[in-house]
Amino acid sequence: MTSPVLHTERLILRVPSAEDFEAWAAFHAEEDTMRFLGGIQARGTAWRGLCTMVGAWHVRGFAMFSVIERETDRWVGRIGPWQPEGWPGREIGWGVAREFAGRGYAQEAAGAAMDYAVDVLGWDHVIHTIDPENAGSIRLAQRLGAVNQGPVSLPAPLESFRVDAWGQSADQWRARRGRPTS
């Protein structure tokens, strides 16, 4: 397995590792952060989630990245390509720890992950599964150029979650890439 590392102006996106666990577990214990990401998780569940993400890199060749702040080397969140079995499409998902919210890191990292999915993985279409009440993620999807493509179903055990697929084609992303966003 290759371990890609992406660099943006302020961030490093790399494959998650054991050194991320304390920040990963704290992120998954934040009630506000996890409101639209399946709810808070105990440390053991968070550990299994981290291992699932690392395992997906080995099995699928992609998964979400750990996002690291370049200036401080602190763990910011998890953002990147995601498509577990039964998922409604190839997704770029995101989640940023509360202390880093509002800094534009999610957009910066999601843009790099979109480039990776389109240019390296060869994806022709990308979605973001978003709860209709998650205004912050909807705004980010819109800034990335995605449009609401309607409700989709997630596989068990997430089938009770209401989500819409916000998405765009690779060609739409390429045409938009590099344009200023508001």
Image (cartoon, helix red, strand yellow):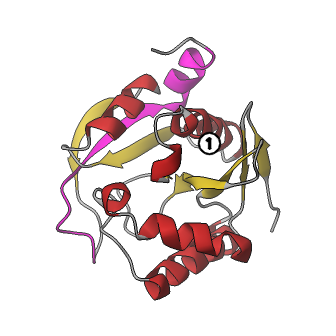
Q: Is residue 84 visible?
A: no
Task: Identify the residue at horizontal 26%, vertical 36% (top origin).
Answer: 135
Instruction: Work out which residue is located at the far top of the displayed protein and give it.
Output: 180
Residue at the image position 35 percent from the left and 39 percent from the top = 137
Q: Is residue 166 left or right of residue 28?
A: left
Q: Residue placed at 79% from the left, 51% from the top?
A: 5
Q: Is residue 54 above or below residue 90?
A: below
Q: Is 81 in front, or is 132?
A: 132
- Where is residue 165? Give x, y as percent: 30, 44
33 or 61: which is nearer to us? 33
Q: Quadrant of the C terminus?
A: top left
Element type at mark 1: helix
Vertically, is 57 above or below 167? Answer: below
At which x and y percent is residue 152?
A: 23, 52
Badge count? 1
Q: Is residue 98 magenta?
A: no
The residue to which callout 1 is attached is 113
Rendered view: 3 above or below 56: above
Say which of 54 and 103 sits in front. 103
Residue type at mark 1? Ala
* Quadrant housing the N terminus: bottom right
Q: Does residue 157 appear left or right of residue 50 in this picture?
A: left
Left/right placement of residue 93 relative to residue 78 reads left
Expressed as whole percent of the image width and height from the top left, the position of residue 62 reads 64, 60
In the displayed orientation, state which residue is furthest to the bottom: 44
Percent position of residue 126, x then y: 47, 41
Instruction: Indicate yes or no whether the magenta region holds residue 159.
Output: yes
Indicate whether 11 appears above or below 78.
above
Quick check: can you spot residue 165?
Answer: yes
- How crowded pointer 1 is (Cα within 10 Å; few <14, some 14-19, many 20+) is rated as many
Q: Quadrant of residue 105?
A: top right
Q: Which residues are magenta?
A: 157-178
